[in-house]
Amino acid sequence: MTLDVETRAGNTRSAYRGRFAPSPTGPLHLGSLLAAIGSWMMARHADGEWLVRIEDVDTPRCVEGIAEQQLRTLAAFGLESDLPVLRQSHRQDIYRSALQTLLDQNAAFPCRCSRNDLRDEGNIHRKCLEHPSGHTAAVRLRVPDGLTITIEDRIHGTFVQQLDTEVGDFVLFRADGLWAYQLAVVVDDAAQQITHVVRGADLLDSAPRQRYLQQILAVPQTEYAHLPLVLDVDGHKLSKSSLATPVTESDPLPAMNVVWRLLGQVEPIVARNPNRWLQEALRSFEPNRIPRSELRPSGPVNSQGE
Ligand code: GLU
């Protein structure tokens, strides 16, 4: 299928284009900063480009004004998108046309089975119930029997998922009228010509769904690297919507040094400002040092770092 492709200066396609794609559900915290700096480092280390995309399709979870705040925070850390920032909320038409392509191919189908209906099935959809209880239809992608998808993750190695039994037919368009993350992310990564997806390890188990959608939509397949998650003192993943302490814009360097150590990097970085810090850090960045396991920063996780 044809997706609208971002035009960019020079018009030569870079061999590596990465991205950071926050949902505007709360201010950026240390875990988001790790994903932002980690994806930026991997991109620049490969002489590639780095884009920012605001993933605001799940409108009830988005908080007014937070996207702008996230972009300000990124700028305070010296992190700016190489192309204009894309917002998913402006892209209804392109998602609709991708969905129509899948419906026309009979790769997707309307479904009124509610989450409750699927409880006995472990929330895995394999075929529609005769009397589904959902009033409005969602649209699901049909997952063939026996489909196994293997991802070679740069950090986690081989990740295999049996898509039919572990995930089932998955939702592309929700019964509440919203676009599902899985469809929006694949359509936008393709439209923005993203080659490498570097993000938190909580999304590793989404990667096979996204790879399969890429195959079905006949768009280029992205490479994956899933960065370790940062946990709070109780061992929970930091999350924007659960009000994890935001990173402070006024004093970025201590947080950058914390992230640097969490990324497994050992060379201390001495720099006067975030832009210099990024350049210095890039010189000694070693992707192979990034750890696989979850991270518990010693001391407060609020980025002050001491
Ligand atoms: N929007 C997602 C988040 O904020 C990230 C999605 C992705 O990187 O694929 O967690």
Image: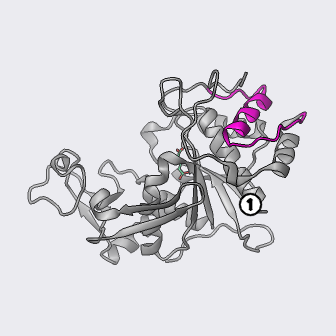
Residue 256 in magenta stretch: yes
Task: Let me know if residue 84 appears in the view.
Answer: no
Residue 260, quarter of picture:
top right
Classify 119 as above or below 268: below
Where in the figure is residue 132, as x and y percent of width and height? 13, 54
108 lies left or right of 275: left
**In screen coordinates, is 137 left or right of 220?**
left
Q: Which residue appears farthest toward the left when viewing the image?
A: 130
Q: Which residue bears the numbered disc 1? A: 49
The vertical placement of 92 against 273, above or below, is below
Q: Colour scheme used in the picture?
A: one colour
Q: Is residue 135 left or right of residue 248?
A: left
Q: Nearer the viewer, residue 53 or 255?
A: 255
**Rendered location of residue 165, percent (x, y):** 27, 60
Identify the magenta region: 246-272
Quadrant location of the C terminus in the rendered image: top right
**What residue appears at the point 70 percent right and 69 percent down from the top-left corner?**
7
Q: Is residue 218 left or right of residue 245?
A: left
Label 1 crowding class (10 Å Cα cut-off): few <14, some 14-19, many 20+?
A: many
Magenta residue check for 131: no
Position of residue 267 relative to residue 137, above or below, is above
Residue 295 position in % (x across, y down): 58, 36
Give the residue type that dot 1 points to.
Answer: Glu
Q: Position of residue 299 (x, y in %)?
A: 64, 21
The answer to whether any part of residue 96 appears in the image is yes
| Number of marks drawn | 1
